[in-house]
């Protein structure tokens, strides 16, 4: 196997733009590869961490298996508590949308649970957001609208079965 070539630090800004462009072109694999190259050169680059996380979650819709471990590792690398909460909400929201479209048994209940989880993270982010950053509020509203539009509800609590004592 060939050895990977290393990106120069001076090339990082242009590489980040290219990664974002590939995301917008619905080519998350290419964006992921670029972000991995950036992070090999600058392991603390927060824009590359965020772009990589978004590229991975873009793959949810394409049916690729993206492990919770991958997303959790990237979320843990985020230095900002606000961004960590906001992007944790994004991951849950994107999983919810994928679940809703899956048309599997219980998908509507699972989607509802994931949307509610996303909303909880967006509320945490909203509470600590920098001035003028209402993205978490906008995402929370989107989740509410999707829940209402699709008539999603929580699963009924299971009936407790009482067993007689012997």
Image: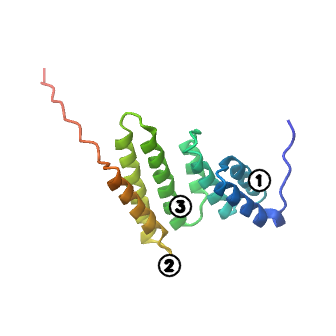
The earlier-in-sequence mark between 2 and 3 is 3
**Residue with the mark numbered 2:** 132
Q: How far apart are marks 3 and 1 (CA)?
A: 22 Å
Judged left or right of residue 99, residue 109 is left
**Residue with the mark numbered 1:** 37
Q: In which quarter of the image is residue 41?
A: bottom right
Instruction: Give the mark count.
Output: 3
Judged left or right of residue 86, residue 105 is left
**Residue with the mark numbered 3:** 84
Label 3 close to label 1 by CB (< 8 Å): no
Q: Where is residue 112 in the image (x, y as percent from the top left)?
A: 36, 48
The earlier-in-sequence mark between 2 and 1 is 1
Judged left or right of residue 68, residue 102 is left
Q: How crowded is mark 3: few (under 14 residues within 10 Å), some or many (20 or more)?
A: many
Residue furthest out toward the bottom: 131
Q: How is the image coloured?
A: rainbow
Q: In which quarter of the image is residue 21?
A: bottom right
Q: Where is residue 31 in the image (x, y as percent from the top left)?
A: 70, 53
Q: Nearer the viewer, residue 15 or 150?
A: 150
Helix, strand, or loop for circle 3?
helix
Helix, strand, or loop for circle 2?
loop
Task: Identify the image quadrant of the C terminus.
Answer: top left
Judged left or right of residue 69, residue 140 is left
């Amino acid at each position: 196997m060939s050895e990977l070539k290393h990106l120069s630090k001076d090339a990082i800004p242009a590489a980040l733009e290219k990664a974002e462009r590939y995301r917008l072109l619905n080519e998350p694999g290419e964006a992921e590869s670029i972000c991995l190259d950036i992070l090999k050169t600058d392991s603390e680059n927060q824009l590359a961490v965020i772009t990589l996380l978004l590229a991975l979650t873009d793959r949810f819709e394409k049916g690729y298996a993206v492990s919770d471990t991958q997303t959790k590792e990237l979320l843990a690398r985020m230095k900002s508590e606000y961004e960590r909460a906001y992007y944790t909400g994004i991951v849950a929201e994107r999983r919810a949308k994928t679940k809703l479209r899956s048309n599997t048994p219980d998908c509507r209940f699972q989607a509802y649970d994931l949307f509610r989880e996303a909303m909880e993270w967006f509320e945490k982010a909203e509470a600590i957001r920098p001035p003028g950053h209402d993205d978490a509020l906008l995402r929370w509203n989107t989740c509410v609208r999707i829940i209402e539009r699709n008539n999603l509800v929580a699963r009924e609590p299971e009936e407790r079965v009482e067993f007689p004592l012997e």
